[in-house]
Amino acid sequence: MIAYMRNVRRHQKSDEGASAVEYGLLVAAIAAVIVVVVFALGGLVKDKFSKTCGNIQSSGVTSAATGKCAP
């Protein structure tokens, strides 16, 4: 009986597995937020660059390497 109680106490003190799972969930949540932000702002950034490129083309300024703005 005493050996059983010691064994139970030994398992109660080790909670390393739970903390590893919690860290894994945190990392997954942070990665999901980053993906959502990138997809949400990606279209906005693309539109801004397209407008800037269009303005540059209409003003007659071109790239020295290609002679045009990249699509």
Image: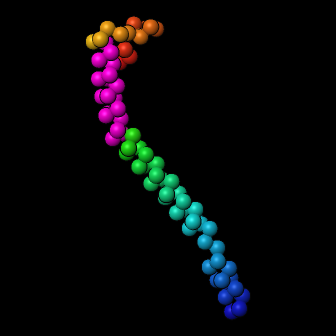
50 relative position to 22: left or right: left
Residue sitting nearer the eye, 62 or 41: 62
Instruction: Measuring from the top left, give residue 16's x and y in whole percent.
Output: 62, 68
| Colour convention | rainbow
The residue located at (41%, 10%) in the rendering is 63
Disc count in the image?
0
Query: Which quarter of the image is occupied by the N terminus?
Result: bottom right
Residue sitting nearer the eye, 9 or 70: 70
- In the displayed structure, would residue 6 be above or below residue 66? below
Instruction: Measuring from the top left, give residue 38's x and y in whole percent.
Output: 39, 40
Examine the image and state in which quarter residue 17 appears: bottom right
Among all residues in the image, which is located at the extreme bottom? 1
Residue sitting nearer the eye, 38 or 54: 54
Q: Is residue 2 magenta?
A: no
The residue located at (38%, 9%) in the rendering is 62
Magenta segment range? 39-57
- In the displayed structure, would residue 21 be above or below residue 62? below
Q: Main secondary structure of the magenta part?
A: helix
Examine the image and state in which quarter residue 64 appears: top left
Query: Which quarter of the image is occupied by the C terminus?
Result: top left
The residue located at (29%, 17%) in the rendering is 55
The residue located at (70%, 85%) in the rendering is 6
